[in-house]
Image: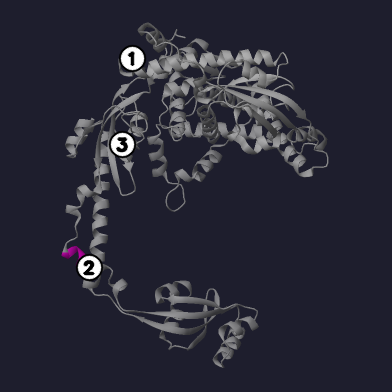
């Protein structure tokens, strides 16, 4: 509804991590790059059924895992349990159901996407293209194998995405919003509010007696989630780097000599010429231009007089010039002396007049002069070949179901086992030291696999290095033992007491304010040593510009009634703010064409989004979505680290 405009601009913000999750999942779904529905293993107990298509537990877990990997690009420490608890599970599930429902609705209306159209879209995806910019079947197969997808699953997603676009595109753009409708909302941006904010920090509250053992234990049990270590994984790996092949990759004298001989033309003495050229459509005109140039007119002036433009070729080489014109023209141009005018001579492009502006003799290079250069080139080539051959060998053995130990032994690699790692590659939460870059990539691969999966090869950096990786053990998220963190828990308990005291003090002050007592008097009567009261004065337009930097008390002030007060907790449990709104000055956007125009655009987008949401809801209702709520709840509880019947 149109009231969403106010919510979109001024609503209380959620947690940052939740916003990142929802945005990234939405983008991933919109691009159709996660596993398709209905293309995997069937299940007699589907989580969702729409028409004849079913969403199985395994398929939803695949989608959740892919979505989590994308979110980890922004939040490396996030694990599946946190992802589920912060809304990721519901968001992914709802997106999947919407896609299934819209696809079924489109089928009921007789809409279909041809296989040729789907293949055309696949071929146009840059990730599936080779170095020549064309579709590469090898690249396509490789990426699908890495993502554990089949070609049919990709086609299914593209088919669904195309149908959704066909359904939604006509309603997503409602067209221009009338200025009369936009003006009241534009006026909101000019509204100004004034008030005051007081602050009760927890430091103003006495900490009380030292907590007892029983109190610490009870607090730890109640707040075990605060002390839970995220999921960790023990990864077995073997790293292969170019340095391991350097000794055997050194170029021999024979190889250097052979390479020099192979590229003899490259190192031979040659001539480079700066040429000026005019190309004319007919011979008569070409002869006239050539006569003028031979009489002393410059190539540029002669071309200009004919309504043409002379081109200049700097450091032209004969072979390259021949390819651009013809062999006969190149022979003539490179046979002429400096200042000579060649032509007119004919090529498929027309009649050429060429003038030799200058000639440079380039001396050849002896074998000794280029020995170091050739040795380096040969060594790099041998290194790349050795790495590629070893990788291909291991890749083939993985396809043959070789174990990690067999792969290591067969290629004489050095196997290592990591400490329990977090997703970003660190083995401990404490400290600001960045994780080892190699371990970070290995950990990322380890978190994309299950312990039962086959080993994988992953690239390391851009020099051809790679690693063989196998997830060895998964350590589920669990609270740290109280004995290890007892002092910190005791400190948290004391802070919790102080925070509760700050909340009670804030509520007592709030009650007095809402009875008409001035905020300064109410704060003073609390008997606490509090910071000075701060004035608040801002317009909605200023708030929109500040975005995420907007202080919570200011945001709260714009959701309050005039002459009222409210409390709001400060970040990081630092205390409580008390916000009082004294005055509201209404805005008037009449005559402000720029602001009204901007608001019309925002309203059009919101109305379009509302149309899309309502259409999706209607489609879900029309096709009768069947949800197995018990199975969905059980899977959600399992992935969030809770027992099926837990709270």
- Please name which of the two marks, 2 or 3, marks the residue nearer to the observer: 3
Which residue is under mark 3?
Answer: 439
List x then y, in percent, for residue 340: 47, 89
Image side of residue 166 versus residue 142, left or right: right
Q: Dot 2 lies on which element? A: helix
Outermost residue, bottom side: 295
For the N terminus, the image quarter is top right
Q: What residue is drawn where x is 71% and y is 16%? A: 517
Check if residue 571 falls in the magenta segment.
no
- Please name which of the two marks, 2 or 1, marks the residue nearer to the observer: 1
Residue 306 marker: none
Q: Which residues are magenta?
A: 253-259
List x then y, in percent, for residue 584: 76, 28
Residue 371 marker: 2
Q: Quadrant of residue 597?
A: top right
Which one is in front, 326 or 296? 296
List x then y, in percent, for residue 303: 60, 81
Which one is in front, 25 or 580? 580
Q: Dot 3 lies on which element? A: helix
Q: Residue 430, can we see it?
A: yes
Residue 482 marker: 1
Q: Which comes sooner in the sequence, label 3 or label 1?
A: 3
């Amino acid at each position: 509804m149109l009231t969403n405009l106010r919510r979109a601009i001024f609503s209380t913000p959620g947690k940052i991590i939740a916003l990142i999750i929802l945005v990234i999942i939405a983008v991933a779904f919109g691009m159709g790059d996660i596993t398709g529905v209905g293309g995997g293993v069937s299940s007699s107990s589907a989580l969702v059924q729409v028409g004849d298509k079913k969403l199985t537990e395994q398929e939803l877990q695949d989608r959740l895992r892919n979505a989590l990997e994308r979110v980890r690009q922004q939040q490396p420490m996030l694990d599946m349990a946190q992802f589920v608890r912060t809304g990721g599970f519901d968001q992914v599930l709802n997106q999947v159901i919407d896609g299934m429902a819209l696809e079924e609705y489109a089928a009921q209306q007789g809409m279909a996407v041809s296989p040729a159209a789907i293949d055309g879209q696949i071929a146009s995806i840059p990730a599936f293209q080779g170095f020549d910019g064309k579709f590469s079947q090898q690249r396509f197969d490789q990426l699908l194998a890495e993502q554990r997808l089949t070609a049919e699953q990709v086609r299914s997603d593209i088919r669904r995405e195309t149908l959704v676009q066909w359904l939604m595109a006509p309603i997503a753009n409602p067209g221009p919003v009338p200025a009369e409708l936009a003006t009241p909302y534009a006026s909101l941006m000019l509204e100004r509010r004034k008030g005051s904010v007081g602050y009760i920090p927890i430091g103003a509250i006495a900490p009380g007696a030292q907590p007892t053992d029983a109190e610490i234990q009870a607090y730890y049990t109640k707040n075990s989630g605060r002390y839970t270590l995220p999921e960790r994984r023990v990864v077995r790996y073997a790293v292969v780097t170019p340095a391991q092949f350097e000794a055997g990759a050194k170029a021999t004298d024979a190889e250097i000599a052979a390479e020099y001989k192979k590229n003899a033309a490259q190192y031979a003495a040659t001539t480079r010429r700066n040429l000026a050229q005019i190309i004319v459509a007919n011979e008569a005109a070409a002869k006239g231009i050539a006569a003028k140039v031979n009489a002393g007119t410059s190539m540029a002036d002669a071309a200009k007089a004919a309504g043409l433009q002379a081109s200049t070729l700097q450091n032209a080489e004969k072979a390259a010039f021949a390819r651009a014109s013809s062999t006969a023209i190149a022979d003539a141009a490179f046979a002429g002396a400096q200042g000579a005018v060649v032509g007119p001579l004919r090529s498929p492009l027309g009649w050429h007049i060429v003038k030799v502006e200058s000639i440079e003799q380039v001396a050849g290079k002896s074998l000794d002069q280029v020995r170091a250069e050739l040795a380096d080139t040969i060594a790099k080539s041998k290194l790349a070949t050795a790495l590629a051959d070893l990788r291909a060998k291991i890749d083939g053995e993985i396809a043959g179901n070789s174990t990690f130990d067999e792969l290591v032994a067969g290629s004489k690699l050095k196997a290592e086992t990591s400490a329990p790692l977090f997703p970003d590659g660190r083995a401990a939460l404490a400290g600001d030291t960045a994780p080892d870059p190699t371990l970070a990539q290995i950990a990322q691969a380890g978190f994309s696999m299950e312990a039962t999966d086959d080993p994988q090869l992953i690239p390391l950096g851009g020099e051809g290095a790679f690693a063989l990786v196998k997830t060895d053990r998964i350590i589920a998220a669990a609270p740290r033992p109280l004995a290890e963190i007892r002092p910190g828990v005791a400190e948290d308990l004391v802070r919790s007491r102080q925070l509760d005291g700050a909340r009670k003090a804030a509520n007592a002050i709030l009650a007095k304010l809402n009875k008409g007592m001035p905020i300064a008097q109410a704060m003073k009567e609390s008997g606490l040593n509090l910071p000075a009261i701060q004035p608040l004065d801002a317009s909605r337009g200023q708030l929109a510009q500040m975005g995420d930097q907007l202080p919570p008390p200011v945001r709260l002030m714009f959701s309050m009634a005039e002459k009222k007060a409210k409390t709001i907790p400060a970040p990081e449990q630092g205390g409580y703010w008390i916000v009082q709104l004294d005055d509201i000055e209404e805005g008037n956007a009449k005559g402000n064409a720029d602001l009204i125009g901007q608001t019309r655009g925002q309203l059009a987008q919101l109305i379009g989004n509302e149309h899309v949401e309502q259409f999706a809801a209607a489609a879900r209702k029309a096709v009768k979505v069947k949800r197995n709520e018990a199975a969905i709840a059980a899977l959600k509880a399992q992935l969030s680290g809770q027992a099926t019947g837990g709270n």
